[in-house]
């Protein structure tokens, strides 16, 4: 069941909808992580605007997500190769 929640990011409150308790937990964890990174950039770059710091957080998170997707694809290909090698090995035992 969908639940209306409020998340505070960079000092601004945002109304959101969580479709499950698990999604709510994930959204709150994500907001906490964004705030942690934002606060880090806030300390490093006090002269930058809130928008600038949120853009840096977004860029870094997107770069990390893309790197993880590439790594997952690579691991999937390696797993497929290992499955094929195992199947070929087992066929040779027959």
Image (cartoon, rainbow, N blue to C red):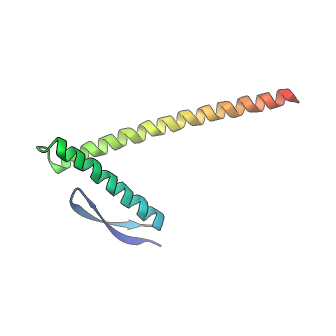
Question: Can the viewer see residue 92 in this picture?
Answer: yes
Q: At 33% across and 57% down in the image, what residue appears?
A: 31
- Say which quarter of the image contains residue 86: top right
**Is residue 74 positioned above or below 41 on the image?**
above
In the rendered picture of this protein, how many numbered marks are placed on residues?
Answer: 0
Q: At 83% across and 30% down in the image, what residue appears?
A: 91
Image spot of residue 45 (x, y percent): 16, 42
Image spot of residue 46 (x, y percent): 13, 45
- Say which quarter of the image contains residue 43: top left
Q: Is residue 56 left or right of residue 61?
A: left
Q: Is residue 80 left or right of residue 4?
A: right
Image spot of residue 18 (x, y percent): 41, 66
Instruction: Farthest residue to the left: give it.
Output: 47
Image spot of residue 23 (x, y percent): 44, 62
Q: Is residue 56 left or right of residue 93?
A: left
- Say which quarter of the image contains residue 52: top left
Question: Can the viewer see residue 20 in this picture?
Answer: no
Q: Looking at the figure, which quarter contains the C terminus?
A: top right
Q: At 32% across and 40% down in the image, what residue appears?
A: 60
- 84 or 8: which is nearer to us? 8
Q: At 70% across and 34% down in the image, what residue appears?
A: 83
**Is residue 54 positioned above or below 14 on the image?**
above
**Is residue 4 positioned above or below 31 on the image?**
below
Instruction: Farthest residue to the right: give it.
Output: 94
């Amino acid at each position: 069941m969908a639940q209306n929640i409020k998340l505070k990011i960079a000092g601004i409150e945002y109304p959101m909808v969580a479709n499950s308790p698990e999604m709510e937990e994930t959204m709150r964890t994500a907001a906490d992580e964004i705030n942690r990174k934002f606060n880090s950039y806030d300390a490093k770059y006090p002269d930058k605007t809130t928008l600038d710091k949120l853009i840096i957080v977004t860029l870094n998170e997107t770069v990390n997500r893309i790197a993880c997707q590439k790594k997952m694809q690579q691991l999937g290909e390696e797993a497929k190769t290992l499955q094929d090698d195992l199947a070929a090995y087992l066929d040779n035992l027959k």
